Image: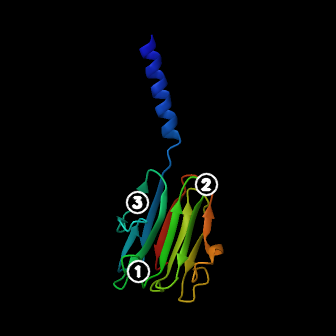
Amino acid sequence: MFSKLALAFIAASAAIVNVHAETHTITFTNNCGYGTPYLRDQNGNVLSTGAPYTSNGPILGAIAYLQTGPCGNNGENCLLVETSLNGEFSSTDLSLIPPHSFQVTSGFGYYNGCDGAGADCTDPDCPDAMTDPSQTWKQVGCSVPNVDLAITFCD
């Protein structure tokens, strides 16, 4: 009797853990016809070179950019998409903070929650991009758990 009850408790506990598991997917659309999308984690590790990336947990301090030749390993010389996706609060922004600079139009948008929230950078002046670290109001937030992010180049 005890073993059946214990097994039932373990199975119920596992089901509850799976229901509360956090996942996020970042997808890329490259309409440029050239270049390779890069997604790196906060340690500089490459998470994706264009394929959708799904994390079973938060994505903290990730950067994305389109490698068109002049981009450094941290997106230097290119427009950067910075993101942290987590269950409590997600935040994404476009960065032209030096040494980052405009090279192709880029944008992002949340989906599966906060649909329609995002930003685009269509020219070098890009009013939606951060050009100074103090411009935190340009970050686009989302407080929906398990939100996903779509990044588009040459949109």
Q: Tell me the kind of residue under disc 1.
A: Cys
Q: Residues within 10 Å of mark 3 (few under 14, many from 20)?
A: some
Report how far apart the C-alphas of labels 1 and 3 lie in the structure: 20 Å
User: Is residue 131 positioned above or below 151 on the image?
Assistant: below
Which label was assigned to residue 144? 2
Report how far apart the C-alphas of labels 2 and 1 lie in the structure: 31 Å
Image quadrant assignment for residue 66: bottom left
Residue sitting at x 49%, y 24% = 9
Label whose residue precedes the other's in the sequence (2 or 1): 1
Q: Secondary structure at mark 1?
A: loop
User: Is residue 109 positioned above or below 95 on the image?
Assistant: above
Residue pointed to by mark 1: 32
Q: Residues within 10 Å of mark 1 (few under 14, many from 20)?
A: some
Residue sitting at x 47%, y 77% = 80
Residue pointed to by mark 3: 53
Q: Say whether residue 71 is left or right of residue 21.
A: left
Q: Secondary structure at mark 3?
A: strand
Image coordinates of residue 92 in percent, x first then y, are 55, 68
